[in-house]
Image: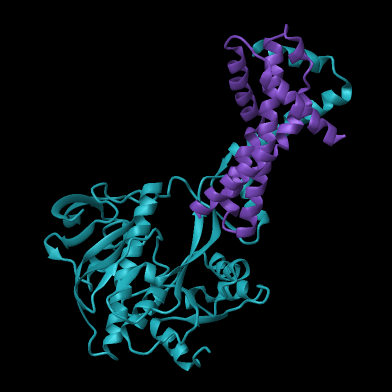
Chain colours: A purple, B cyan
Amino acid sequence: MKQNLWKKGREDYKTFSDIPLKGFKSTLAFLLSLVLTIITVLPLIILIYQLYFILGYHRLLLRLLIIISWLMLLFCNGLSNYFTLELTKHYYPNEPKLQKLSSKAIFVYQSLNIGFAVATFIILFTITNIIK
Amino acid sequence: MKAYLLKLYKSFLNSKLITKIFVILSLIIYAAILSITLIKVEYEVIMPGGLTPVSDYINIDTDKKMGEVYTVSVYTKREISLFQKWIGKLNPHLDLEKYDPKNVLTKEEDIKQGEIYRNLSIKYSVIVAYTEAMKNNPNVNITYEFTGAVIYHKFKNTPKELSLGDTITKVNGEPVTIDNYEKILLRNSPIDTDTCNVNQKEITLTVIKEGKRQETDIKVNDNCNKKYLIEAFLLPDFNIKEATPKFNQKKINNLGPSGGLMQTLGIYNALVDEDVTKGYRIVGTGTINLNGTSGIIGGVKQKIITAQLIDLLYNYPIDIFFVTADNFKEAKYIYERLPNPSFELIEVNSFSAVLEHLNKKVAKK
């Protein structure tokens, strides 16, 4: 079931990218989706940040925190794409192709986006090693 | 955006009861997490830190190595959140200490104080190690002179004209010496001006401030049956005029005086012919005084845990952990509760006690 949702998400995302949208509202939807994502995960960001400060001395706990941060990044990627599609649908109600796309499927696809996951994993571990 | 949020609100109103409960619970959790992470409490948390080789503090111009001698540090963080306090209570590695924000130094003063402590500690280590090494190696020599009393801690009644790091050299024209500085400058405890009548008198201090000598007239409290004049903590400072072999202090971020004992050991080992460490990996904590005795330090629990974690997490076992006698009881309590520590915990009250213990040991294979 999840596999299907992921595949549907991939197809929907491709369709979404191919739809030509006129005006500035698509950019606005993108920017607002970032704001909404940050507001949604803000308590968790602060929580993780504070944990880094007092548990960072322990290498295993530090690695665990990095993995949690990485999973949160994946979740944020999914969430921001979900909000982008939802807001775009709201701003372009007369686009039939757009209205048919599934925000949930795109959320699942982007949360489990392999390319993004690998890239962020490498970046996070590189930064952590540099800071260390 | 507003219309979109309104749409979300309407869909919430039209949703099933279970969805409404879920959304409301999520919002409560959201607000709760935000609250516990944003509310600050007047506690500081002390955490395990790391090991620093003595060779990172100082370089001695000799071919002889310092050996595997390390100082051990802890991390502290003030102004923690309620959430961090809870984690601190749950984590046995951490300690929480309440503090009064009115009586603590600013962050800048805290760093400055740590730097003063560290720099004086390195000077004391050099003097003690060179003086001890001179007994065994005729090629080692050191000459130094007392320069004054350095202010390393201020209180709320410390005269405003005085800053951390100032060196007081004269009081009313009378030179401050290593023998009299405590008598003519120090007060044994801060005055509680609310409970006693305070008369003020003016004295003239000669002070070296940021390298410049200047005379400063200051008013000091002179009552309440207190013995001393200046409400501040002072330490003697020295100018090392000549040292053979030469040494140079390196830039390092570690703060405080707790590395004194191990710094002395590392420097001494670089000056004498034999390897007094006998190949052991040595960690220790304790300040060093000019007479070679070692003094109390903070965060001993976290320092013992650091030595254990270095072994467990980095597979870097420590052989010996020297701890100053003033902290030994607390250190032993923690040590006895460690699962299979790689190191032996040794109580010492002076640098000569460290050498004595190492002298008895057989060289490590």
Q: Is residue B154 visible?
A: no
Q: Quick check: B107 left or right of B146?
A: right
The answer to whether B320 is drawn above or below residue B334 in the figure is: below
Q: Which quarter of the picture shows residue A95?
A: top right
Rendered residue at 38%/67% (across/down): B56
Name the one closer to the observer, B203 or B269: B269
Spot occupied by residue A84 in the image (x, y as percentages of width and height): 67, 21
The answer to whether A30 is drawn above or below residue B226 in the figure is: above
Name the one closer to the observer, B305 or B156: B305
Q: Quick check: A67 left or right of A100?
A: left
Spot occupied by residue A42 in the image (x, y as percentages of width and height): 62, 33
Q: In the rendered image, which quarter contains the N terminus of chain A?
A: top right
The answer to whether B246 is drawn above or below residue B41 in the figure is: below
Q: Quick check: A29 left or right of B169?
A: right
| Residue sitting at the far top | A94
Name the one closer to the observer, A86 or B115: A86
- The number of numbered badges drawn on the structure is 0
Spot occupied by residue B140 in the image (x, y as percentages of width and height): 24, 84
Q: Is residue B79 visible?
A: yes
Q: Which quarter of the picture shows residue A93?
A: top right
Rendered residue at 27%/49% (across/down): B159
The answer to whether B5 is drawn above or below residue A121 in the figure is: above
Spot occupied by residue A120 in the image (x, y as percentages of width and height): 61, 42
Q: Which quarter of the picture shows residue B66?
A: bottom left
| Residue sitting at the far left | B173
